[in-house]
Image (cartoon, rainbow, N blue to C red):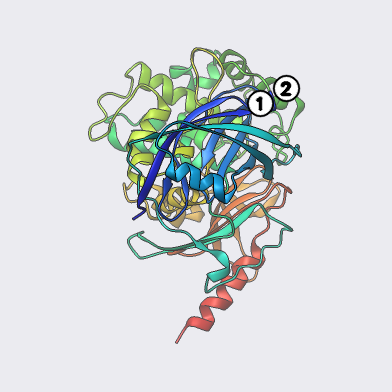
């Protein structure tokens, strides 16, 4: 258990207009760690701001309307830190800051300067957080194929999913989830609602919940189709062709309102292809799913969700029923949404995490303690849809499968933009890596893990 030494109300004034002035609360433990007590990000444009746990005052900037993160630190001298601990009234400190690690495939900043820190002692409670062991002390030392990843590590559980150990190269750095959000937000919410509703919600049509999808063909497209990237509405089946098209970037990712995003998501034409529809990866399909789920909650279309802390908002439903039981960090309470009155959850991206959060959510998927269906999905690669043009890849309900050509074994994994991966190595081990080099390789890590397991065998 982390013991509390002191809690402060902080006001932070940076010398850059891009970084918002922040008023927040932070605890300092007897072990010398700072721990933020506010949930989510403050500010919005051009960056949201959140503090992170760490030996120094660490922070993260989140790009407006995107998922890029820029990590930084406020440097307090030993004398200044002691001043904080001894403070019985408000004190003013002048410190320096610098951006340190950044996870953004298309942009980085070399920012440093001065920040004014005003600290007022408070009385408050500090939550308990799971311990993370430095990767250098791990019994297995995975060697990523990627050069200079932002963070990587692995975790081991017991047969029931209880965490035995988590080893991380940088346990306090904030990372974007990008398309891992498709699993942790959209898929988790859909399966959670389906599990607790008398209605088979995934069999409902997109058109029945999203009036903007006016084409008659959307009546035949279900929420399950959107979850599986098999809506039958697309331009090209070539890998990532629709996802990286100029129209997707300009008319979906870069726009800020729900009206604009849903207009693009509904605009894909129905294709006269063989039934069932082929796999075509589109983040807009996940947006359709998230929109349908949030609309269904708001209009009470799913009936009474017995056994759930139900809410009319998709993010709050997840916070109450998954985030809180998993004891995720304050940073994770930051699911992003459109910048309008509807504040529609994106669903397919927009989640920011600490490595401990990433492991907690991945363990939840791996062991499926609420019996949502994740366990069956992971165990049945034969039911996943083949990816056109790649016989070794399959996809189902936001989860990818890769077949090792040497062993012909299928490995489930999660994948995110820029170079983010979570690999389920076996029923008790998972590996993760976050980078911004567009490099998603992990075959060598799997084979190294197998060698380590063989060496441990009696």
Q: Which mark is residue 308?
A: none
- The image position of residue 436, as x and y in percent, is 70, 46
Q: Nearer the viewer, residue 415 or 211?
A: 415
Residue 303: image quadrant is: top left
Residue 254 image point, x, y percent: 68, 23
User: Badges 1 and 2: C-beta atoms under 8 Å apart?
Assistant: yes
The N terminus sits in image quarter? bottom left
Q: How many marks?
A: 2
Query: What residue is pinned by disc 1?
Result: 253
Q: Residue furthest bottom?
A: 458
- The image shows residue 108, relative to residue 82, as above or below, that is above
Which structural element holds mark 1?
A: helix
Q: Position of residue 149 (x, y in %)?
A: 68, 55
- In the figure, residue 317 lies in which quadrant? top left
Residue 356 seen in this snapshot? yes
Is 278 positioned to the left or the right of 2 in the image? right
Q: Is residue 231 shown to the viewer in this render? A: no
Seen from the viewer's position, the closer of residues 385 and 150 is 150
Q: Residues within 10 Å of mark 2 (few under 14, many from 20)?
A: few
* Vertical order, 441 against 396 (above or below): below
Q: Is residue 124 above or below residue 414?
A: above
Question: Could you give the CA–CA distance between mark 1 and mark 2, rounded to whole angstroms?
Answer: 6 Å
Q: Quadrant of the C terminus?
A: bottom left
Point out residue 412 in the picture as x, y percentages from the top left corner: 53, 55
Circle 2 SS class: helix
Indicate which disc residue 250 carries.
2
Front residue (pair 305, 229): 305
Q: Nearer the viewer, residue 253 or 23?
A: 23
- Residue furthest left in the image: 306
């Amino acid at each position: 258990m982390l013991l509390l030494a002191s809690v402060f109300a902080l006001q932070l004034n940076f010398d850059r207009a891009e970084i918002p002035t922040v008023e927040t609360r932070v605890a300092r433990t007897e072990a010398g760690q700072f721990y933020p007590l506010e949930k989510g990000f403050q500010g919005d444009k051009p960056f949201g701001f959140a503090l992170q746990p760490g030996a120094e005052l660490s922070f993260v900037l989140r790009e407006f309307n995107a998922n890029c993160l820029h990590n930084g630190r406020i440097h307090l001298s030993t004398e200044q830190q002691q001043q904080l601990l001894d403070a019985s009234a408000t004190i003013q400190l002048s410190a320096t800051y610098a951006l340190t690690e950044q996870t953004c495939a298309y942009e980085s900043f070399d920012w440093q300067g001065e920040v004014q820190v005003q600290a007022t002692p408070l009385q408050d409670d500090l939550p308990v957080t799971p311990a993370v062991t430095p990767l250098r002390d791990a019994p297995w030392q995975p060697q990523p194929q990627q050069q200079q990843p932002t963070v990587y590590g692995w975790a081991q559980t017991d047969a029931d999913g209880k965490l035995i150990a988590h080893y991380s190269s940088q346990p306090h750095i904030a990372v974007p989830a990008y398309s891992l959000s498709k699993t942790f937000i959209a898929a988790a919410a859909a399966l959670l609602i389906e599990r607790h509703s008398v209605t088979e919600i995934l069999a409902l049509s997109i058109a029945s919940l999203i009036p903007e999808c006016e084409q008659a063909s959307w009546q035949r497209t279900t929420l399950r189709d959107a979850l599986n990237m098999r809506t039958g509405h697309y331009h090209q089946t070539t890998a990532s062709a629709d996802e990286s098209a100029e129209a997707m970037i300009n008319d979906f990712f870069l726009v800020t309102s729900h009206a604009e995003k849903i207009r693009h998501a509904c605009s894909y034409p129905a294709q006269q292809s063989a039934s069932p529809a082929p796999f075509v990866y589109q983040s807009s399909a996940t947006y359709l799913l998230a929109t349908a789920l949030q609309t269904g909650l708001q209009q009470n279309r799913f009936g009474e969700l017995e056994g759930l802390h139900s809410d009319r908002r998709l993010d709050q439903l997840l916070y109450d029923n998954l985030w809180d039981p998993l004891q995720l960090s304050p940073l994770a309470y930051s699911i992003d949404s459109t910048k309008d009155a509807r504040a529609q959850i994106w669903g397919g991206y927009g989640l920011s995490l600490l490595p401990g959060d990433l492991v907690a959510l991945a363990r939840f998927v791996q062991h499926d303690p609420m019996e949502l269906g994740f366990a069956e999905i992971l165990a049945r690669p034969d039911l996943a849809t083949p990816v056109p043009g790649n016989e070794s890849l399959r996809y189902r309900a936001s989860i990818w499968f890769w077949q090792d050509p040497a062993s012909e074994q299928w490995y489930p994994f999660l994948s995110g933009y820029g170079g983010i991966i979570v690999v389920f190595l076996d029923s008790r081990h998972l590996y993760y890596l976050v980078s911004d080099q567009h490099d998603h390789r992990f075959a060598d890590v799997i084979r190294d893990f197998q060698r380590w397991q063989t060496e441990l065998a009696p």
